[in-house]
Each structure stands twice: as structure tokens, then as C-alpha cells.
Amino acid sequence: MFKKLFGSSEPKEEKVLPWQPLTNVSLLDVIVDKSKTKTQLIFKHSTRCGISSMVMKQFVSAYDVNNNADLYYLDLLSYRDVSNEVGYKFQVMHQSPQLLVIKNGVVVAHASHGGINELELERYS
């Protein structure tokens, strides 16, 4: 009865996604090239924003690791130059948090805030 009320004292295993850090502007050309054969996802995250952290936790929880896409993580506070270049290169206005779906060198979908978790990513794989 107490476990139902208060939960188990055993730690929950945390889901880990196959993130690739996006830390250099030159990686954007690699992403464009790879997007010709496989969907590329860029998750832009502000480490100081509670909303961004909440959305990221929801994304991690819901993300299907069997999704046929490469997943990049961009800490936009530490790599502001990369974040700015993402906006220029893919012609998407900066928002945080933000998820970009890239296929054949262009953004085919993007969303920010709660809209991130509403994207049907399987449509783009």
C-alpha cells in the first residue's frame, strides 16, 4: 500500500538518447550531407530555461530510439555561434527550445516549446 502512495524507493532507470553534440559550425555541413540519406534532428536547448528543460524531458521520454534519424543536441548558451548559424543556414527563426527536422539538406519541419512533442517524427524517417 505504501509503495502505491509514495512510490518505490528504488531509483528509476533514466532513458538515454543517442545524442551527438553539436558544438561546431562545420558540423552543419556534415548534417546537410548526411540528411541526403538519413533524417537529421537538431534539438536546440537552453540550459538555463525551465520550460526548455521540461520540454526536453518530455521529448526524451517520448522519443522512439528506433526512429531512423541522427539526433543532435545543441546547448545554445555555450555554442551561440552555432545556434546563430543554424538559423541562417536553415532559414528558421531562432526559438528555444526548438527541434529541426532536416531531410535532403533542408528543414522539412520544425517546432518550438510544446509543439516539439506534437511533431510526428516517424513521418520524416
Image: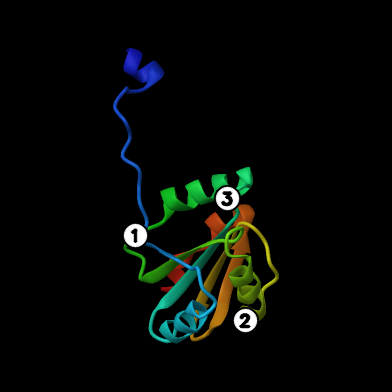
- x, y percentage for residue 29? 50, 84
Q: Which mark is residue 89?
A: 2
Residue that mark 1 sits on: 65
Of labels 2 and 3, the one closer to you: 3
Residue kind at label 2, given as amino acid type: Lys
Q: Which mark is residue 14?
A: none
Hey, which quadrant is residue 65 in on the image? bottom left
Q: Mark 1: which secondary structure?
A: loop
Of the pair 119 and 79, the residue shown nearer to us:
79
Residue that mark 3 sits on: 47
Against 106, residue 41 (above or below) is above
Q: Residues within 10 Å of mark 3 (few under 14, many from 20)?
A: some
Of the pair 9 and 62, the residue shown nearer to us:
9
Q: CA gap, disc 1 to disc 3?
A: 23 Å
Residue at image coords 62%, 81%: 89
The quadrant the N terminus occupies is top left
Q: Residues within 10 Å of mark 2 (few under 14, many from 20)?
A: some
Of labels 2 and 1, the one closer to you: 2
Q: CA gap, disc 2 to disc 1?
A: 27 Å
Residue kind at label 1, given as amino acid type: Val
- x, y percentage for residue 116? 56, 58
Which badge, 2 or 3, is on the more N-terminal residue? 3
Q: Mark 3: which secondary structure?
A: loop
Hey, which quadrant is residue 100 in on the image? bottom right
* Number of numbered discs on residues: 3
Which badge, 2 or 1, is on the more N-terminal residue? 1
Residue at image coords 46%, 79%: 31
Q: CA gap, disc 2 to disc 3?
A: 23 Å
Q: Residues within 10 Å of mark 1 (few under 14, many from 20)?
A: few
Residue at image coords 66%, 74%: 92
Hey, which quadrant is residue 6 in on the image? top left
| View extreme (top): residue | 1
